[in-house]
Image: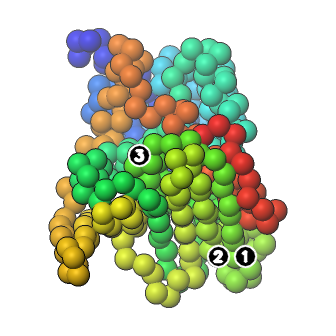
Amino acid sequence: MPEKTRKKLKGGVVGYGGAFNMGRHHLEAMRKAGVRPAAVAEIDPARLQEAGEDYPGIGLFDTVDRMLRESDVDLITIITPHNTHADLAVQCLKGNRHVVCEKPLAITTAECDRMIAEAKKRKLTLSTYHNRHWDGCITEARKRIERGAIGDIVRIEAHMGVQGQPRDWWRSSKSISGGILYDWGVHLLEYSLQLIDSEIVEVGGFAKNGFWAPKTVWGDDTNEDEAFAVVRFKSGQWLTLCITSLDANPKPGWVEITGTKGSYLFGGDSWKWITRNRDETVLREGKNPPWEGESKRFYKNVADHILDGAPLVITPEWARRPIHILDLAARSARSGRTLKAKYG
């Protein structure tokens, strides 16, 4: 579609909070993808004023209701705490707007299913801001693994964390954030699910609570000190995820993939590819491509999908998969038993 037509698509954000200045980040990514920044909804007057200074003439609203009633914005991105995503997304979908949610899409599988059902009912686009889908670390890993560098994948181990007290902000609250697995864990799962193309069968979860809780503002509602998930796939492959604030000896990298012919380990900046040649270990290593352009690429795909019907890369069904794993892992940790997946 011609560029002049694409610029007719108007974008807005719900949330212009100060953490990482994500409201401006999203509006800039939209703008670079040909979507015109048109509206901001924010409950903090100071942040709403700053949005107006950043984007002179943009529509400013102190509630989502007002944005939906008084603006003609087409695409709304929700940049608010995790526990608000589902209700806000459904509200915007009922207002006949296309919706993007910051990741994670929601906290529970039921919330995801409610959002997906509303989008389908109204024939609207729903997606999650998985801009890291195109990160250099995972694109490099996919390239080598798909060429057979490590043979057939047997298992993936994803991990992140160090020993350290959680910060006193909403991401450290279990009820608001979903738990320790819901921040970087959703990224690591999204990477891993690009490599294991199989149905999720069951998930087991483990959690340690109570060490940091007395030292934070959230008390008993503080995120787990450490959480661990094990995912079994129909293919026979498995995946583990560990996010921790207790590890005094953190493992290198973020994701390690073990195959029948070798292993591949990557972090954000670098990778290692390890194979065995008879009795000799062969180590190859290098730097990942720089992280750039993914935000614009995400919004360009969303705009192409809305305007031209191009295939949506980050579908809501795709974004539901890591949430289903995290939801089952949390429930499994509470119940002490493995739980079956509800389609995966």
**Identity of the residue furthest to the front in this view:** 278
- SS label for mark 2: loop
The residues bearing labels 1 and 2 have C-alpha atoms spaced at a distance of 5 Å
What's the residue at 40%, 40% (across, down)? 26
Q: Residue at x 36, y 61 (%)?
A: 259
Mark closest to the chain's N terminus, 2 or 3 = 3
Pointer 2: what residue?
225
**Could you tell me the amino acid type at mark 1?**
Asn
Extreme residue toward the right, this view: 335
Work out which quarter of the rendered image holds the C terminus and state it: top right
Q: Comparing marks 1 and 3, which lies closer to the viewer? A: 3
Q: Which mark is residue 194?
A: 3
| Label located before the other in sequence (1 or 3) | 3
Q: In the rendering, which numbered label is found on residue 262?
A: none
Residue to which mark 1 is pinned = 209
Q: Are marks 1 and 2 in contact (CB under 8 Å)?
A: yes
Q: Is residue 184 left or right of residue 55?
A: right
The chosen color scheme is: rainbow
From the image, which quarter does the N terminus lie in?
Answer: top left
Mark 1 Cα shell of 10 Å, populated few (<14), some (14-19), many (≥20): some
Q: Residues within 10 Å of mark 3 (few under 14, many from 20)?
A: some
Residue 47 visible in this rendered orientation of the protein? no
Give neighbour class at mark 2: few <14, some 14-19, many 20+ (Cα, 10 Å): many
Q: CA distance from mark 1 to mark 3?
A: 31 Å
Residue 23 in the image: above or below residue 280: above
Name the residue type under label 3: Gln
Label 3: which secondary element: helix
Could you tell me if the residues under marks 1 and 3 are in contact, i.e. CB atoms within 8 Å? no
